[in-house]
Image (cartoon, coloured by chain):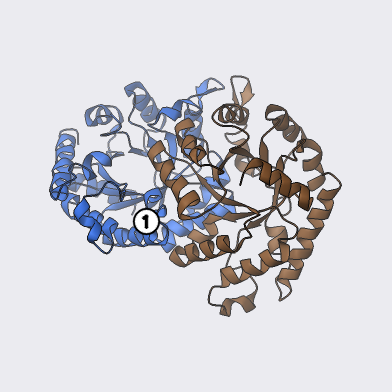
Chain colours: A brown, B blue
Amino acid sequence: MTRSELISRIRAKKSVLCVGLDTDISKIPQHLLTEEDPIFAFNKAIIDATKEYTVSYKINTAFYEARGLKGWESMEKTLSYIPSDIFTIADAKRGDIGNTSTQYAKTFFEACNFDSVTIAPYMGKDSVAPFLEFEGKWGIVLGITSNEGSKDFQQLICNGQPLYEHVLQAVSSWGSPENIMFVVGATRKEQLARVRELCPDHFFLIPGVGAQGGDVATVCTHTLNKDAGILINVSRAVIYASSGTDFAEAAGAAARQYQQEMVSFL
Amino acid sequence: MTRSELISRIRAKKSVLCVGLDTDISKIPQHLLTEEDPIFAFNKAIIDATKEYTVSYKINTAFYEARGLKGWESMEKTLSYIPSDIFTIADAKRGDIGNTSTQYAKTFFEACNFDSVTIAPYMGKDSVAPFLEFEGKWGIVLGITSNEGSKDFQQLICNGQPLYEHVLQAVSSWGSPENIMFVVGATRKEQLARVRELCPDHFFLIPGVGAQGGDVATVCTHTLNKDAGILINVSRAVIYASSGTDFAEAAGAAARQYQQEMVSFL
């Protein structure tokens, strides 16, 4: 999906909501466990209930890989089930030397047909560049994350600037706002504003809203740009809104509530 | 596999050789393409020919994932075929927020039975810690890598020290030499010596020998400790030593040559 296509879908739906399909077999409603593929059955119902309100789905590959071959099958079925006008993210945090990153890019852009994949930047330019060579595909590089450990290295001061600012600036020069996004954790507002100042045109994938404690208003106020320029990811607070037989309706209601909150900012 | 078991195998075989199974369908001998599972057929022959000289096999997961479900099957079959007294590494460069890293750890330590997995440290302590909770299993954290891009962030000076030194020091405090190794690229000798000074007891997984230009003598001189303390990985220079029907013998001969070079240092 191209940048202009993504922007037009955000405008049409008045939403920057990304629903994270971190689907954990131990957390889905009991009654689904008799299904042939409980993970896919859950995802299918969640997608049906939330697709009206979302412009993106993020599949957290770890939850699928942990189930081995049948997990990969559930992931492929889920990806195929997502409507083609919704932006798809393989949240896989990959990155390795060039010839290996090329293999990862083939995995997510060819073997699977995701629009984007998340990338860990520690290994530098030749680990990121192979993801940027696919037409209409995106690399979403970790900038500053929303977890406790983000302070361990990302916030170290290097030559007068935190490491994550070096990452944003360097990675920006390796591609363009047409093929690079950044992961920017929904943590402190000063940080959100600073990151938008450094990267005025890039899309940000913003996790940390919902179970991790961030909120939509703070994020929108400090990061929206003229093209919207953000995707706000919510995982657990949507997909596990209820653990009963009404899980899908509850997820739909939660997604709708997030989307409604976004309308006034868009 | 525990640290003392690994050390005793290194002593018995007089080898610190790790063979990297970066098996690429486009590079294996033509005559294998008619096999039902060409990747596994190749790996099986390579393992048979090299196991006498190696103490470890490193499976580069990217090359398997890129082939989707059948790639995961080839990986699982390969892992099962590796003799149980040889240390196995999932070279997967994973790392994410805690609940997700736990899923990755389950993938490689439970769904598959690897001894270790490589980890990208950018997300900090809570992204690494879940890998350290499995008895007899290891996290192998990226310290300084052997690729061109290692200069982009790893070598940035933060508070007077390159970032990778912060990583080595911080990560060392999160576990012990019994469950943490570091990836240390076989690049400049000053760097190798400095890293050994910072982490006197940890095992290092050292890539960059062979196709990437590093050499065994430099690595051994500057990084061996009283327990050996290193695994030198060679991938392409062993597994693609010949592209003909003699590929396995050629790989065996290449592995033997590396091991012979190691004997005088061990």
Q: Which residue is pictured at 18% across the width and 49% down the height?
A: B50
Closer to the camera, B8 or B82? B82
Q: Which residue is pictured at 57% across the width and 72% down the height?
A: A38
Neighbour class for label 1 at 10 Å: few (<14), some, many (≥20)? Answer: many
Residue B120 visible in image: yes
- Name the residue tied to disc 1: B114
B178 to A175, vertically: above or below? below
Residue A214 visible in image: no
Q: Give the residue type that dot 1 points to.
A: Phe
Residue A39: where, in percent of width, then height? Answer: 57, 68
Q: Quadrant of residue A189?
A: top right
Locate the C terminus of chain A and report the quarter of the image it occupies.
Answer: top right
Describe residue A188's horizontal placement relative to residue B179 as left or right: right
Closer to the camera, A88 or B150? A88
Residue B65: where, in percent of width, then height? Answer: 41, 54
Residue B19: where, in percent of width, then height? Answer: 26, 45
Determine the chain carrying the residue at label 1: B
Describe residue A12's horizontal placement relative to residue B57 as left or right: right
Q: Which residue is pictured at 19% across the width and 45% down the height?
A: B243
Describe residue B52's horizontal placement relative to residue B201 as left or right: left
Q: Which residue sits furthest right?
A: A264
Element assignment for label 1 = loop
B211 to B93, vertically: above or below? above
How many labels sit on residues?
1
Describe residue A191's horizontal placement relative to residue B186 as left or right: right
A114 to A102, vertically: above or below? below
